[in-house]
Image: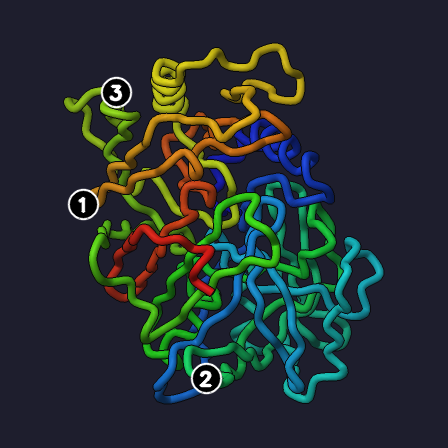
């Protein structure tokens, strides 16, 4: 879920794209870009293990265009399944009582049943990490967190113990994690989603809070392809031991900006087959640093219109089929009707210092029966998004301390 304000103009296009393939499965999902309207820095408060001999991990699986990450909160541990979102910082879950909330299949977290649950007082510096934090009559810090898709969570800002599994088969704990206990949550969430796990780069994110306790502010993910059976999952790894290394690894530097949440990188251009398309249309034009960011909460890749139009034209030129037209379900997306997996060109994203090759399974998405669509859309912004379709089947490492993102091609369905 993107948290960069300038991409709000593409929300309607994204709605068409997501509604198309969600309706081909079943259920409701969050079909908009999220925009974090309420971020503010705060001192790190992470506490937990002082030394790690094993790498903390969490299962993550595909669910209607998003990826659900499993972790446990509270004492005793209570499992939640939240959207793994590198585009936002706040971690929150639906909590009892929840009178104005979306439907959820699993039980909701009841803070009264956890011995480690602690609310944050109005006098605490932590209450000011959200600009909309207000004081309740009970002197508790209430929060509001809004998303551009019209989704919103409201509740109590609190601290809890988070429990993760590990490579050694043991449980690892992180105490005092700041999270949102949502009592009023609305939007396009489906009934499997119990909240959001904020994995952005800002100081309020889960990654930043766990950093020193787990051996460093870094993590890696391996997302299974869209339409992978829900019983198949991969793992996210955190801290020491989550580094991406070995044969085939390429890395690109992160670009620091005022907004610390998104993972900004620099895209130089895209190759469609053997045809290279410069980001700005000509090698004479200087490419602005940090013109893309990686967002696991946004399915399609979002490109500036001038680049998107050239990519679409070149894909059309290289696919030996006529595109599907006059289908009201498809909107303006580039789609092809076929009963078999569509054979399309390989695409290479030329990031600064890293060429990332995408196969058709990562770019041509089965939108409905017998129809495959290019998993891209466009924006009037100069900043694009590298979405989760394209991120699948790559082990991707985010190292906030070394300020790099690394890519290693991998069959993520075998990364359990």
**Which numbered marker is on residue 158?**
none
Task: Give above or below for 274 relative to 375.
Answer: above
Q: Which mark is residue 47?
A: 2
Residue 200 coordinates in the image, percent (x, y): 44, 58
Q: Secondary structure at mark 3?
A: loop
Q: How is the image coloured?
A: rainbow
Image location (x, y in percent) of residue 329: 66, 22
- Residue at the far front: name it: 340
Q: Secondary structure at mark 2?
A: strand
> How far apart in space, not on screen, are marks 2 and 3 (Cα)?
49 Å
The residue tagged 1 is 353
The local crowd at label 2, few if under 14, some if 14 to 19, many if 20 or more residues have their Cα within 10 Å, is some
Residue 52: which quarter of the image?
bottom left
In depth, the one of 218 and 272 nearer the eye is 272
Residue shown at 48% from the left, 85% from the top:
170
* Residue at screen point 50% across, 20% down: 334
Q: Which residue is mark 3?
A: 281
Q: Are marks 1 and 3 in contact (CB under 8 Å)?
A: no
The image position of residue 164, as x and y in percent, is: 52, 77
Q: Residues within 10 Å of mark 1 (few under 14, many from 20)?
A: few
Q: Is residue 54 left or right of residue 139?
A: left
């Amino acid at each position: 879920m993107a948290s960069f304000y300038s991409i709000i103009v593409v929300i309607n296009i994204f709605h068409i794209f997501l509604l198309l393939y969600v309706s081909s499965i079943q259920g409701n999902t969050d079909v908009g870009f999220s925009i974090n309207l309420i971020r503010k820095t705060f001192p790190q408060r992470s506490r937990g293990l002082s030394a790690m001999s094993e790498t903390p991990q969490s299962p993550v699986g595909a669910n209607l265009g998003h990826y659900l990450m499993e972790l446990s909160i509270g004492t005793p541990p209570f499992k939640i399944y939240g959207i793994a979102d590198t585009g936002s910082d706040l971690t929150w879950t639906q909590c009892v009582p929840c009178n104005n909330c979306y439907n959820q299949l699993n039980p909701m977290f009841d803070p009264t049943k956890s011995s480690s649950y602690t609310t944050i007082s109005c006098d605490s510096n932590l209450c000011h990490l959200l600009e909309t934090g207000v004081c309740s009559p009970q002197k508790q810090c209430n929060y509001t967190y809004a998303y551009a898709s019209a989704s919103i969570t409201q509740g109590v800002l609190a601290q809890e113990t988070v429990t993760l599994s590990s490579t050694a088969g043991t449980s690892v704990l992180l105490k005092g994690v700041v999270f949102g206990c949502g009592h009023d949550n609305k939007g396009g969430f489906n009934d499997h989603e119990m909240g959001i796990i904020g994995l952005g780069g800002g100081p309020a994110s889960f990654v930043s809070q766990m950093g020193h306790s787990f051996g460093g502010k870094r993590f890696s993910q391996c997302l299974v392809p869209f339409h992978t059976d829900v019983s198949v999952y991969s793992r996210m790894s955190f801290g020491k031991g989550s580094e991406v290394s070995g044969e085939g690894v390429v890395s690109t530097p992160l670009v620091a900006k005022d907004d610390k949440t998104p993972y900004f990188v620099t895209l130089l251009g895209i190759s469609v087959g053997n045809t290279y398309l410069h980001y700005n249309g000509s090698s004479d034009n200087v490419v602005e640093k940090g013109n893309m960011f990686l967002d696991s909460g946004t399915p399609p890749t979002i490109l500036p219109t001038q680049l998107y139009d050239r990519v679409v034209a070149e894909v059309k030129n290289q696919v030996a089929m006529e595109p599907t037209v006059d289908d009201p379900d498809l909107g303006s997306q580039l789609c092809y009707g076929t009963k078999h997996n569509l054979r399309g060109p390989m695409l290479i994203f030329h990031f600064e210092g890293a060429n990332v090759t995408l196969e058709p399974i990562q770019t041509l998405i089965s939108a409905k029966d017998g129809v495959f669509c290019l998993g891209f859309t466009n924006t009037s912004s100069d900043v694009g998004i590298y979405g989760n379709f394209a991120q699948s089947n790559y082990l991707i490492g985010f190292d906030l301390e070394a300020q790099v993102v690394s890519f290693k091609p991998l069959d993520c369905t075998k990364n359990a």
